[in-house]
Image (cartoon, helix red, strand yellow):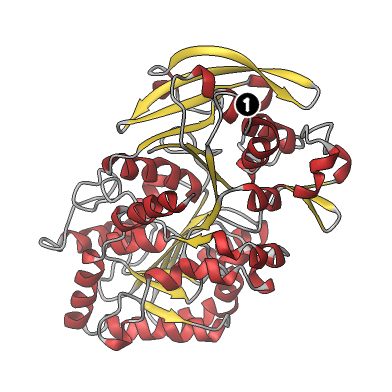
Amino acid sequence: MKVLYAASEALPFMASGGLADVAGSLPQALRRRFVGCHVVMPLYSGIPSELRENMKFITHITVPVAWRRQYCGIFEAKYGGVTYYLLDNEYYFKRDTIYGHYDDGERFAFFSRAILEIIPHIGWKPDIIHCNDWQTALTPVYYQTIYANIPGYENIKTVFTIHNIQYQGRYGFDILEDVFGIAPQNGYLLEYRGDINLMKGAIECANVVSTVSPSYAQEIMDPWFSYGLDPILRDRSFKFYGILNGIDVKNYDPETDPAIWQNYSDAKPEGKAVNKTELQKFFGLTIDEDAPLIGIVSRLVAHKGLDLIRTVLEELLNTSNAQLAVLGSGDSEYEEFFRYIANKYPDRVGVRIGFIPDVARKIYAGADMFLMPSKSEPCGLSQMVALRYGTIPIVRETGGLRDSVSDSGDGEGNGFVFKNYNAHDMLHAIRRAILGYQSKEGWHILVSRALECDNSWSKSANQYINMYKSID
């Protein structure tokens, strides 16, 4: 079985979120199970020079973009035993950021078409093209409407994975031909509620559709979660799968991680206390082993539950000895809120605005608890990383959080869970965690249980293989 995994970002080359983690680790897990999995992504100008040095130029072609033809250089790289194809076009990809440009529709239409155009030139024909999110959603559409009957392209199947249904690739219908190169008679595949909707087109045309956790697969059938796509998802539910993401447990390993102050493991857990002390020093907090230290590593945006935190954080600080270590960036209102709190409680709250991977790892290793009260969470990787480092998640029961964290109140769970999207329900879960922390013996058992959790790709990769095999 040969799978071409198509993504707009992938570690270690370029990343802005969880998609890059998945695209960097799932193909390696598939390869270990004897699936030939290659990755294709854009060659962004921001890719580090040390990674560029190991790329090999294969050839260049031109790619149709509606009525135009655009240059596409094809480069090959090897990483972790996986072959990557990086597609070069400086007009589209020499940008300061990956997303958020006025011509994103055209940029990723080029990429979606190029994924198919490179196949005769790489000496490797896939059985399956696995596309991810709206940036590659046009590939199944192009395949069905243009390539399926072209010699050399026969019998390729397409898979489309929804990582976050909020971002669908919606555009005005007037650019159907001029930007996307879709003939008017095929416009119905993309048309949805008067607009072009690229994700809807992929749902229509892909052989199977998946999302990144079983709970999220059910949730997005509901209008509350679907951002308007629930009718088409329910109509196509017969080809829908929910498979929980995993994490790269070699990359995230407290026993070997060079970014943390002292390595530790379930067998030698003493180092976690050292990391807590050093994290308190790093953020300028009071050095106190008895103060429960809560970590937050998050995009600072509303759907991550920041409004819940804002509502009750001072109440928590004024009624407990809890401390907070916060890392993230996003909406200015939340950045300013955390700056205000850090200035008001400098010995209790430490904040770094931005995303600094080494600091994130220090928080995962040094915090006692990890707060993740998301309004919606397709999968979430942070709670899995926290467990990997023996840091106990406090989460809302939604999406992948529901599938990976269970409440320890039953004596068997690995975290603290609340159900309703309510600030005081969250506060109650935090207080339960703080009460649990005061029982040192019980807390050590919970930390050990967290360190033993298996959130590797082993199970998920097998589920992906079974999904691939299910395609007629």
| Position of residue 133 measured from the top left corner of the image (x, y, whole percent) | 59, 48
Is 17 left or right of 381, judged from the image as shown? right
Q: At which x and y percent is residue 52?
A: 44, 20
Crowdedness near tag 1: few (<14), some (14–19) or many (≥20) residues, C-alpha within 10 Å: few
Up/down of 152 relative to 160, above or below: above
Residue 213 seen in the current view: yes
Quarter-of-image position of residue 366: bottom left
Residue 436: quarter of image? bottom left
Residue drawn at (58%, 80%) of the image: 421
Task: Identify the secondary structure beneath mark 1.
Answer: loop
The answer to whether residue 171 is above or below residue 343 is above
Residue 341 % position (x, y): 54, 68
Which quadrant of the view contains residue 93? Answer: top right
Q: In the image, 149: left or right of 87?
A: right
Which residue has dot 1 on it? 150
Residue 375 appears in the picture as rendered: no
Residue 401, image x, y percentages? 44, 69
Residue positioned 46% across, 27% down in the render: 125
Residue at the limit of the structure toward the right, as seen here: 174
Q: Amino acid at mark 1?
A: Ile
Taking the view exactly as shown, the residue that stands out farthest to the left is 267
Quarter of the image containing the N terminus?
top left
Residue at image location 37% in from the left, 86% down from the top: 432
Foreground residue, 357 or 93? 93
User: Could you tell whether 239 is left or right of 385 in the image?
Assistant: right
